[in-house]
């Protein structure tokens, strides 16, 4: 894992997102599952659905990071792409009934930042692995 930026990043991001998902349940007691306005976890709004999404993404990243370079590279690129989409769409959701994961401005910045880091590493690092699998 020390020699692969993709495995390291997937493992670290996976652990962090799992932790955020777990801690999120401590602050969302009494909040509706699809509540458009959640409770603050530091400066990020979360609701139970948002917590479950964090758990799923964290588990996927951590599993890929502990699995192989190819799996980590694929998962980093995939999650990065999804977060880029969520970050962009999230700019238009706060204050609407479509905001079922209780996004706020801080969430959007985090999702866009995560997307940039995951995509940058997923698409640029560990090229030798990609060349061998073609």
Image (cartoon, rainbow, N blue to C red):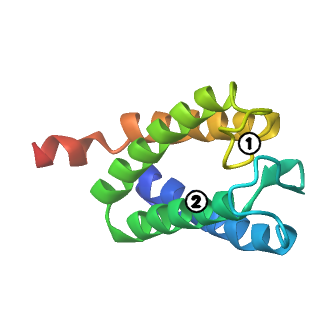
Depth order, front residue of 130/49: 49
Kindly identify which residue carries mark 2: 53
Outermost residue, front side: 97
Q: Which mark is residue 103?
A: 1
Q: Residue at x 39, y 64 (%)?
A: 64
Q: Secondary structure at mark 1?
A: loop
Q: Residue at x 60, y 29 (%)?
A: 89
Q: Position of residue 21 (x, y in %)?
A: 68, 67
Q: Nearer the viewer, residue 74 or 33?
A: 33
Disc 2 is placed on an element classified as helix
- For disc 1, the neighbor class at 10 Å (few under 14, some 14 to 19, many from 20) is many
Could you say which quadrant of the image residue 3 lies in?
bottom left
Q: Quadrant of the C terminus?
A: top left
Q: Position of residue 87 (x, y in %)?
A: 62, 33
Residue 103 in percent (x, y) is at 74, 42
Q: Is residue 102 placed above or below 50 in the rendered structure?
A: above
- Placement of 113 over or under 56, stated as above or below: above
Q: Is residue 72 visible?
A: yes
Q: Is residue 1 visible?
A: no
Which numbered disc, 2 or 1, marks the residue that appears first in the sequence? Answer: 2
The image shows residue 10 at horizontal and vertical percentages of 49, 57
Query: In percent of the image, x 61 and y 41: which residue is there?
Result: 114
Residue furthest to the left = 134
Q: Quadrant of the N terminus?
A: bottom left
């Amino acid at each position: 894992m020390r020699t692969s930026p993709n495995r390291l990043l997937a493992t670290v991001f996976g652990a962090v997102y799992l932790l955020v998902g777990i801690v999120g349940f401590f602050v969302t007691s009494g909040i509706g599952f699809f509540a458009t306005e959640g409770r603050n976890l530091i400066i990020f709004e979360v609701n139970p659905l948002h917590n479950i999404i964090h758990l799923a993404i964290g588990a996927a990243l951590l599993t890929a990071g502990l699995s192989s370079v190819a799996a980590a590279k694929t998962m980093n690129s995939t999650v990065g792409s999804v977060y880029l989409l969520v970050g962009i769409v999230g700019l238009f959701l706060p204050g609407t009934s479509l905001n079922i994961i209780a996004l706020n401005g801080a969430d959007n910045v985090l999702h866009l930042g995560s997307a940039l880091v995951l995509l940058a590493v997923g698409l640029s690092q560990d090229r030798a692995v990609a060349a061998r699998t073609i």
